Amino acid sequence: MCLSKALGEGREGTEQALQSTALEQCVAIGLKATDFYNKRKAYQNQTGDLRKGIGMAVVIHGSAIAGLDMASASIKINDDGSFNLLIGATDLGTGSDTVLAQIAAEELGVPLDDIIVYSSDTDFTPFDKGAYASSTTYLSGEAVRKAAAEAARQIREHAALLLRYPDPAQMILADRKVLTPEGRSVSLTEVALSSLHQLNQHQIMATASHTSQVSPPPTAAQFAEITVNTKTGIIQVDRLLMLVDCGRVINPITAAGQVEGGMAQGLGFALTEEMLFDHEGHQITTSLASYHIPRCREMPIMDVIFVQTDEPSGPYGAKSVSEIAIDGVAPAIASAIHNATGIWLRHLPYTPDKVLNALEENRR
Protein backbone atom coordinates (compact mmCIF):
# COMPACT_ATOMS: atom_id res chain seq x y z
CA MET A 1 0.00 0.00 0.00
CA CYS A 2 1.77 3.09 -1.30
CA LEU A 3 -0.34 5.48 0.81
CA SER A 4 1.50 4.43 3.97
CA LYS A 5 4.84 5.20 2.38
CA ALA A 6 3.67 8.60 1.14
CA LEU A 7 2.17 9.68 4.45
CA GLY A 8 4.84 8.50 6.86
CA GLU A 9 4.70 9.75 10.45
CA GLY A 10 6.96 12.76 10.45
CA ARG A 11 9.49 10.70 8.49
CA GLU A 12 9.62 8.61 5.33
CA GLY A 13 6.95 5.94 5.48
CA THR A 14 7.20 2.24 4.76
CA GLU A 15 5.37 0.61 1.88
CA GLN A 16 2.94 -2.01 3.16
CA ALA A 17 1.72 -5.27 1.64
CA LEU A 18 -0.71 -7.95 2.75
CA GLN A 19 1.19 -10.94 4.11
CA SER A 20 -1.91 -12.72 5.40
CA THR A 21 -5.59 -12.34 4.62
CA ALA A 22 -8.76 -14.41 4.60
CA LEU A 23 -10.98 -11.72 3.11
CA GLU A 24 -12.19 -13.97 0.30
CA GLN A 25 -13.16 -16.67 2.79
CA CYS A 26 -14.85 -14.11 5.07
CA VAL A 27 -17.06 -12.99 2.18
CA ALA A 28 -17.85 -16.53 1.04
CA ILE A 29 -18.81 -17.74 4.52
CA GLY A 30 -20.91 -14.63 5.17
CA LEU A 31 -22.80 -14.98 1.90
CA LYS A 32 -23.71 -18.54 2.83
CA ALA A 33 -24.51 -17.79 6.49
CA THR A 34 -26.95 -15.00 5.57
CA ASP A 35 -28.40 -16.60 2.41
CA PHE A 36 -27.38 -13.28 0.93
CA TYR A 37 -28.19 -13.66 -2.77
CA ASN A 38 -31.63 -15.20 -2.27
CA LYS A 39 -32.62 -12.48 0.21
CA ARG A 40 -31.13 -9.75 -1.95
CA LYS A 41 -33.24 -10.88 -4.88
CA ALA A 42 -36.40 -11.37 -2.80
CA TYR A 43 -36.18 -7.84 -1.36
CA GLN A 44 -36.05 -6.05 -4.72
CA ASN A 45 -39.11 -4.10 -5.88
CA GLN A 46 -40.97 -4.32 -2.57
CA THR A 47 -44.19 -2.47 -1.84
CA GLY A 48 -45.77 -1.56 1.48
CA ASP A 49 -44.58 0.52 4.38
CA LEU A 50 -42.12 -1.98 5.89
CA ARG A 51 -39.37 -3.13 3.57
CA LYS A 52 -36.57 -5.58 4.26
CA GLY A 53 -33.01 -5.17 3.04
CA ILE A 54 -29.67 -6.94 3.26
CA GLY A 55 -26.29 -5.44 2.53
CA MET A 56 -22.61 -6.07 2.95
CA ALA A 57 -19.27 -4.29 3.01
CA VAL A 58 -15.63 -5.37 3.07
CA VAL A 59 -13.20 -3.53 5.30
CA ILE A 60 -9.52 -3.34 6.13
CA HIS A 61 -7.75 -1.54 8.98
CA GLY A 62 -4.27 -1.86 10.50
CA SER A 63 -2.24 -2.99 13.50
CA ALA A 64 -0.31 -0.15 15.17
CA ILE A 65 1.46 2.66 13.31
CA ALA A 66 4.37 1.21 11.36
CA GLY A 67 7.79 2.63 12.13
CA LEU A 68 6.55 4.81 14.99
CA ASP A 69 4.86 2.90 17.82
CA MET A 70 6.94 1.07 20.41
CA ALA A 71 6.03 -1.12 23.38
CA SER A 72 8.07 -2.74 26.13
CA ALA A 73 7.59 -5.43 28.74
CA SER A 74 9.53 -6.81 31.72
CA ILE A 75 9.17 -10.19 33.38
CA LYS A 76 10.83 -11.92 36.34
CA ILE A 77 10.50 -15.26 38.04
CA ASN A 78 9.54 -15.47 41.72
CA ASP A 79 10.83 -18.09 44.14
CA ASP A 80 7.56 -20.05 43.93
CA GLY A 81 7.87 -20.39 40.15
CA SER A 82 5.30 -17.70 39.35
CA PHE A 83 6.12 -14.65 37.25
CA ASN A 84 5.61 -10.90 37.54
CA LEU A 85 4.78 -9.31 34.18
CA LEU A 86 5.20 -5.53 33.99
CA ILE A 87 3.62 -3.82 31.01
CA GLY A 88 2.90 -0.22 30.12
CA ALA A 89 -0.14 -1.16 28.03
CA THR A 90 -3.42 -0.08 29.62
CA ASP A 91 -6.41 -2.41 29.77
CA LEU A 92 -9.38 -0.17 28.94
CA GLY A 93 -11.81 -3.06 29.31
CA THR A 94 -10.54 -4.80 26.19
CA GLY A 95 -9.01 -7.70 28.11
CA SER A 96 -5.44 -6.82 27.15
CA ASP A 97 -4.05 -7.76 30.59
CA THR A 98 -5.42 -11.26 30.07
CA VAL A 99 -4.24 -11.57 26.47
CA LEU A 100 -0.71 -10.37 27.26
CA ALA A 101 -0.54 -12.72 30.25
CA GLN A 102 -1.66 -15.58 27.97
CA ILE A 103 1.21 -14.83 25.58
CA ALA A 104 3.72 -14.91 28.44
CA ALA A 105 2.21 -18.10 29.86
CA GLU A 106 2.41 -19.82 26.47
CA GLU A 107 6.07 -18.90 26.06
CA LEU A 108 6.98 -20.03 29.59
CA GLY A 109 4.92 -23.22 29.70
CA VAL A 110 2.84 -22.28 32.75
CA PRO A 111 -0.89 -21.79 33.41
CA LEU A 112 -2.34 -18.30 33.18
CA ASP A 113 -2.72 -18.09 36.97
CA ASP A 114 1.08 -18.13 37.31
CA ILE A 115 1.41 -14.77 35.52
CA ILE A 116 0.88 -11.79 37.85
CA VAL A 117 0.25 -8.67 35.78
CA TYR A 118 1.20 -5.13 36.74
CA SER A 119 0.14 -2.64 34.11
CA SER A 120 -0.07 1.06 33.35
CA ASP A 121 1.78 2.49 36.35
CA THR A 122 4.46 4.62 34.70
CA ASP A 123 6.42 4.80 37.97
CA PHE A 124 7.61 1.23 37.53
CA THR A 125 6.24 -0.33 34.33
CA PRO A 126 8.22 0.02 31.10
CA PHE A 127 7.19 2.32 28.29
CA ASP A 128 4.25 1.61 26.01
CA LYS A 129 2.94 4.02 23.41
CA GLY A 130 -0.65 3.60 24.62
CA ALA A 131 -3.89 1.73 24.00
CA TYR A 132 -4.66 3.14 20.58
CA ALA A 133 -4.17 2.38 16.89
CA SER A 134 -5.40 -1.21 17.27
CA SER A 135 -1.95 -2.15 18.50
CA THR A 136 -1.92 -3.75 21.95
CA THR A 137 -2.13 -7.45 21.04
CA TYR A 138 0.08 -7.02 17.98
CA LEU A 139 2.76 -4.67 19.30
CA SER A 140 2.71 -5.01 23.10
CA GLY A 141 2.04 -8.73 22.69
CA GLU A 142 5.24 -9.21 20.71
CA ALA A 143 7.21 -7.24 23.34
CA VAL A 144 5.80 -9.59 25.99
CA ARG A 145 6.61 -12.65 23.90
CA LYS A 146 10.20 -11.50 23.38
CA ALA A 147 10.69 -10.75 27.08
CA ALA A 148 9.20 -14.11 28.06
CA ALA A 149 11.37 -15.89 25.48
CA GLU A 150 14.50 -14.32 26.98
CA ALA A 151 13.40 -15.30 30.49
CA ALA A 152 12.76 -18.83 29.20
CA ARG A 153 16.28 -18.94 27.76
CA GLN A 154 17.74 -18.01 31.15
CA ILE A 155 15.56 -20.62 32.85
CA ARG A 156 16.78 -23.33 30.46
CA GLU A 157 20.39 -22.36 31.09
CA HIS A 158 20.01 -22.68 34.86
CA ALA A 159 18.00 -25.89 34.55
CA ALA A 160 20.80 -27.31 32.40
CA LEU A 161 23.23 -26.66 35.26
CA LEU A 162 20.94 -28.43 37.72
CA LEU A 163 20.42 -31.43 35.46
CA ARG A 164 23.96 -31.42 34.07
CA TYR A 165 22.53 -31.32 30.58
CA PRO A 166 24.92 -30.10 27.85
CA ASP A 167 22.53 -28.27 25.50
CA PRO A 168 20.01 -25.87 27.12
CA ALA A 169 18.52 -24.99 23.72
CA GLN A 170 17.07 -28.50 23.41
CA MET A 171 15.19 -28.28 26.71
CA ILE A 172 11.52 -27.33 26.73
CA LEU A 173 9.29 -25.54 29.21
CA ALA A 174 5.93 -27.18 29.86
CA ASP A 175 3.63 -27.90 32.81
CA ARG A 176 5.69 -25.69 35.18
CA LYS A 177 8.78 -27.77 34.44
CA VAL A 178 11.93 -27.71 32.34
CA LEU A 179 12.36 -31.01 30.53
CA THR A 180 15.18 -32.64 28.60
CA PRO A 181 14.37 -34.57 25.39
CA GLU A 182 14.92 -37.78 27.40
CA GLY A 183 12.26 -36.80 29.93
CA ARG A 184 14.36 -35.73 32.89
CA SER A 185 12.93 -32.59 34.48
CA VAL A 186 13.22 -29.93 37.11
CA SER A 187 10.37 -27.72 38.30
CA LEU A 188 10.31 -23.96 37.79
CA THR A 189 10.11 -23.58 41.57
CA GLU A 190 13.37 -25.51 41.92
CA VAL A 191 14.99 -23.39 39.20
CA ALA A 192 13.83 -20.18 40.86
CA LEU A 193 14.97 -21.18 44.37
CA SER A 194 18.31 -22.37 43.08
CA SER A 195 19.01 -19.26 41.03
CA LEU A 196 17.99 -16.90 43.84
CA HIS A 197 19.55 -18.68 46.84
CA GLN A 198 22.00 -21.40 45.85
CA LEU A 199 23.72 -22.03 42.52
CA ASN A 200 25.22 -19.08 40.63
CA GLN A 201 22.85 -16.70 42.46
CA HIS A 202 21.11 -14.19 40.21
CA GLN A 203 17.65 -12.90 39.34
CA ILE A 204 16.16 -14.47 36.23
CA MET A 205 14.43 -11.57 34.50
CA ALA A 206 14.18 -9.93 31.10
CA THR A 207 13.03 -6.75 29.41
CA ALA A 208 12.20 -6.43 25.74
CA SER A 209 10.90 -3.77 23.39
CA HIS A 210 9.22 -4.08 20.04
CA THR A 211 8.62 -1.85 17.05
CA SER A 212 7.42 -2.87 13.63
CA GLN A 213 7.99 -1.51 10.16
CA VAL A 214 4.77 -3.19 9.03
CA SER A 215 1.17 -2.73 10.10
CA PRO A 216 -0.51 -5.98 9.06
CA PRO A 217 -4.15 -5.27 8.24
CA PRO A 218 -6.95 -7.38 9.63
CA THR A 219 -9.66 -7.81 7.02
CA ALA A 220 -13.37 -8.43 7.45
CA ALA A 221 -16.75 -8.75 5.76
CA GLN A 222 -19.70 -7.01 7.40
CA PHE A 223 -23.32 -8.04 6.74
CA ALA A 224 -26.41 -6.13 7.84
CA GLU A 225 -30.10 -7.03 7.68
CA ILE A 226 -32.61 -4.22 8.23
CA THR A 227 -36.24 -3.15 8.03
CA VAL A 228 -37.04 0.32 6.69
CA ASN A 229 -40.34 2.02 7.54
CA THR A 230 -41.05 4.13 4.47
CA LYS A 231 -43.76 6.10 6.32
CA THR A 232 -41.57 7.23 9.23
CA GLY A 233 -38.08 6.84 7.74
CA ILE A 234 -37.00 4.77 10.75
CA ILE A 235 -34.41 2.06 10.09
CA GLN A 236 -34.49 -0.97 12.34
CA VAL A 237 -31.38 -3.13 12.21
CA ASP A 238 -32.42 -6.76 12.61
CA ARG A 239 -29.03 -8.47 12.45
CA LEU A 240 -25.34 -7.68 12.17
CA LEU A 241 -22.86 -10.39 11.22
CA MET A 242 -19.14 -9.76 10.97
CA LEU A 243 -16.59 -12.23 9.70
CA VAL A 244 -13.09 -11.23 10.74
CA ASP A 245 -9.57 -12.29 9.84
CA CYS A 246 -7.47 -10.94 12.72
CA GLY A 247 -4.74 -13.52 12.32
CA ARG A 248 -4.50 -16.13 15.06
CA VAL A 249 -7.08 -15.40 17.75
CA ILE A 250 -5.34 -15.35 21.15
CA ASN A 251 -8.53 -15.16 23.23
CA PRO A 252 -11.77 -15.88 21.32
CA ILE A 253 -14.07 -14.59 24.08
CA THR A 254 -12.44 -11.18 24.47
CA ALA A 255 -11.90 -10.90 20.71
CA ALA A 256 -15.61 -11.53 20.06
CA GLY A 257 -16.43 -8.93 22.70
CA GLN A 258 -14.23 -6.43 20.87
CA VAL A 259 -16.07 -7.06 17.60
CA GLU A 260 -19.52 -6.87 19.21
CA GLY A 261 -18.58 -3.62 20.96
CA GLY A 262 -17.21 -2.19 17.73
CA MET A 263 -20.39 -3.06 15.84
CA ALA A 264 -22.43 -1.36 18.60
CA GLN A 265 -20.35 1.79 18.14
CA GLY A 266 -20.71 1.51 14.37
CA LEU A 267 -24.48 1.29 14.77
CA GLY A 268 -24.62 4.66 16.54
CA PHE A 269 -22.24 6.13 13.96
CA ALA A 270 -24.51 4.88 11.16
CA LEU A 271 -27.95 5.80 12.51
CA THR A 272 -28.08 8.31 15.35
CA GLU A 273 -24.87 10.02 16.46
CA GLU A 274 -24.60 13.47 14.92
CA MET A 275 -22.93 16.74 15.92
CA LEU A 276 -25.05 19.66 14.70
CA PHE A 277 -24.01 23.32 14.33
CA ASP A 278 -25.97 26.45 13.49
CA HIS A 279 -25.18 28.76 10.57
CA GLU A 280 -22.73 30.72 12.73
CA GLY A 281 -20.79 27.59 13.70
CA HIS A 282 -22.17 27.27 17.20
CA GLN A 283 -22.63 23.71 18.41
CA ILE A 284 -26.29 22.74 18.84
CA THR A 285 -25.71 19.20 20.09
CA THR A 286 -24.63 19.90 23.66
CA SER A 287 -25.89 16.95 25.71
CA LEU A 288 -26.54 13.23 25.52
CA ALA A 289 -30.27 14.05 25.45
CA SER A 290 -29.83 15.25 21.86
CA TYR A 291 -26.84 13.06 20.96
CA HIS A 292 -28.34 9.59 20.98
CA ILE A 293 -26.12 6.58 21.61
CA PRO A 294 -27.94 3.28 21.04
CA ARG A 295 -28.77 1.54 24.30
CA CYS A 296 -28.58 -2.12 25.19
CA ARG A 297 -32.23 -2.81 24.40
CA GLU A 298 -31.79 -1.23 20.95
CA MET A 299 -29.04 -3.64 19.93
CA PRO A 300 -29.85 -6.07 17.10
CA ILE A 301 -28.81 -9.69 16.98
CA MET A 302 -25.01 -9.63 16.56
CA ASP A 303 -22.89 -12.56 15.43
CA VAL A 304 -19.14 -12.89 15.00
CA ILE A 305 -17.22 -15.49 13.02
CA PHE A 306 -13.41 -15.59 13.02
CA VAL A 307 -11.60 -16.89 9.96
CA GLN A 308 -8.08 -17.42 11.24
CA THR A 309 -4.79 -16.91 9.44
CA ASP A 310 -1.21 -16.75 10.69
CA GLU A 311 0.39 -13.32 10.43
CA PRO A 312 4.18 -13.84 10.22
CA SER A 313 5.03 -10.57 12.01
CA GLY A 314 2.58 -10.95 14.93
CA PRO A 315 2.84 -12.77 18.26
CA TYR A 316 1.75 -16.36 17.58
CA GLY A 317 0.32 -15.13 14.28
CA ALA A 318 -2.01 -12.45 15.73
CA LYS A 319 -3.13 -9.18 14.16
CA SER A 320 -5.38 -6.52 15.64
CA VAL A 321 -9.11 -6.86 16.28
CA SER A 322 -10.67 -3.64 17.52
CA GLU A 323 -11.28 -0.60 15.33
CA ILE A 324 -11.98 -2.71 12.25
CA ALA A 325 -15.23 -3.77 13.93
CA ILE A 326 -16.55 -0.20 13.67
CA ASP A 327 -15.68 0.28 10.02
CA GLY A 328 -18.16 -1.89 8.16
CA VAL A 329 -21.53 -1.23 9.82
CA ALA A 330 -22.38 2.06 8.10
CA PRO A 331 -21.55 0.97 4.52
CA ALA A 332 -23.28 -2.40 5.02
CA ILE A 333 -26.43 -0.61 6.23
CA ALA A 334 -26.23 1.77 3.24
CA SER A 335 -26.14 -1.26 0.97
CA ALA A 336 -29.12 -2.77 2.79
CA ILE A 337 -31.10 0.48 2.52
CA HIS A 338 -30.53 0.47 -1.23
CA ASN A 339 -31.69 -3.14 -1.43
CA ALA A 340 -34.86 -2.32 0.53
CA THR A 341 -35.82 0.98 -1.08
CA GLY A 342 -33.70 1.66 -4.16
CA ILE A 343 -32.15 4.79 -2.61
CA TRP A 344 -28.52 5.47 -1.79
CA LEU A 345 -27.73 7.48 1.35
CA ARG A 346 -24.23 8.93 1.36
CA HIS A 347 -24.24 11.24 4.39
CA LEU A 348 -24.09 9.90 7.94
CA PRO A 349 -26.01 9.31 10.06
CA TYR A 350 -28.94 7.76 8.19
CA THR A 351 -31.63 9.60 10.14
CA PRO A 352 -35.37 9.30 9.38
CA ASP A 353 -35.52 12.75 7.74
CA LYS A 354 -32.72 11.80 5.34
CA VAL A 355 -34.50 8.56 4.49
CA LEU A 356 -37.82 10.33 3.84
CA ASN A 357 -36.19 13.10 1.78
CA ALA A 358 -34.35 10.55 -0.35
CA LEU A 359 -37.51 8.50 -0.86
CA GLU A 360 -39.43 11.61 -1.94
CA GLU A 361 -36.69 12.64 -4.31
CA ASN A 362 -36.61 9.13 -5.73
CA ARG A 363 -40.38 9.25 -6.33
CA ARG A 364 -40.05 12.55 -8.17
Image (cartoon, grey):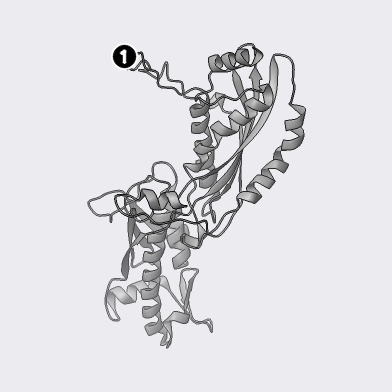
Question: Percent position (x, y) of residue 318?
Answer: 50, 56
Badge 1: residue crowd in 10 Å (few <14, some 14–19, many ≥20): few
- Relative to 241, residue 318 above or below: below
Residue drawn at point x = 39 percent, y = 65 percent: 146
Taking depth in this image into account, of 140 and 229 the one nearest to the observer is 229
Residue drawn at point x = 36 percent, y = 60 percent: 210
Q: Which residue is mark 1?
A: 280
Label 1: state its secondary structure: loop
Question: Percent position (x, y) of residue 106?
Answer: 48, 63
Point out the residue furthest to the left here: 123
Residue drawn at point x = 43 percent, y = 49 percent: 3
Count of labels shown?
Answer: 1
As shown in the figure, which amino acid type bears the numbered disc 1? Glu
Question: Percent position (x, y) of residue 251?
Answer: 52, 52
- Relative to 339, residue 88 above or below: below
Which of the 4 image quarters holds residue 214? Answer: bottom left
Image-based side of 133 in relation to 61, left or right: left
Regarding residue 194, the answer to whether it shows in the image is yes
Taking depth in this image into account, of 269 and 356 the one nearest to the observer is 356
Regarding residue 65, the answer to whether it shows in the image is no
Image-based side of 58 in relation to 30, left or right: left
Question: Percent position (x, y) of residue 19?
Answer: 53, 59
- Relative to 117, residue 34 above or below: above
Residue drawn at point x = 54 percent, y = 22 percent: 350
Q: Quadrant of the C terminus?
A: top right
